[in-house]
Amino acid sequence: MTAERYGAVIGLRPEMEQAYRDLHRQPWPTVLAALKRAHVSNYSIFLRDGVLFSYLEYTGTDFAADMAGLARDPETRRWWELTDPCQFRLPSALPGEWWAPAEELFHLE
């Protein structure tokens, strides 16, 4: 099965960087399980100059529905209550975007 690749960016509040790092050192097993149920794999978050870059691979058949289901998951919502205050929308994000999608320009298989 071929995976769809998704990248996205968001700002990280400097005063919240340590809290964000601490949260991601021990992610909740329930949140990781919810991501897997949503057909997300190979998920990584990178940090550079106050910008977080996320990369994930999606192996399901309906990305929008799986992401909506993830957003309804109570444990994921509790996790976001801790992580969202650490982040801020980038100026280029469109209305309604939190993590702004990044365009894939190159991929080596």
Image (cartoon, grey):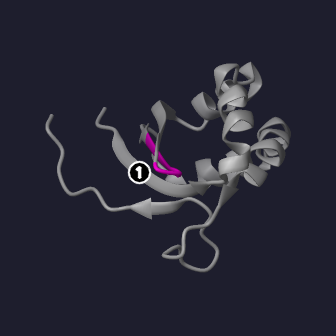
**Residue range highlighted in magenta:** 49-55
Residue 108 versus residue 63: which sits nearer the camera?
108
10 Å crowding of disc 1: few (<14), some (14-19), many (20+): some
**Quick one: which residue is furthest to the bottom in this view?**
95
Q: Is residue 53 magenta?
A: yes
- In this image, 18 relative to 6: left or right? right
| Magenta stretch holds residue 50 | yes
- 27 is higher (above) or lower (below) than 46: above
Q: Residue at x 73, y 45 (%)?
A: 16
Residue at 21 percent of width and 57 percent of height: 105
Q: Quadrant of residue 30?
A: top right
Residue farthest left in this picture? 108
Q: Quadrant of the N terminus?
A: top left
Residue under numbered circle 1: 7
* Secondary structure category for the residue under label 1: strand
Q: Residue at x 40, y 49 (%)?
A: 6
Give x and y (percent) for residue 24. Answer: 65, 28
Residue 10: x %, y % from top left: 55, 57
Please state, as top left, top right, bottom left or bottom right, where the C terminus lies in the image: top left
Residue type of the residue flagged with mark 1: Gly
Residue 30 located left or right of residue 54: right
Q: Main secondary structure of the magenta part?
A: strand
Front residue of 1/34: it is 34
Q: How many marks?
A: 1
Residue 19 is situated, as x and y percent measured from the top left of the image, at: 75, 35
Is 4 left, or right, of 49 in this rendering? Answer: left
Q: Position of residue 60 (x, y in %)?
A: 47, 41
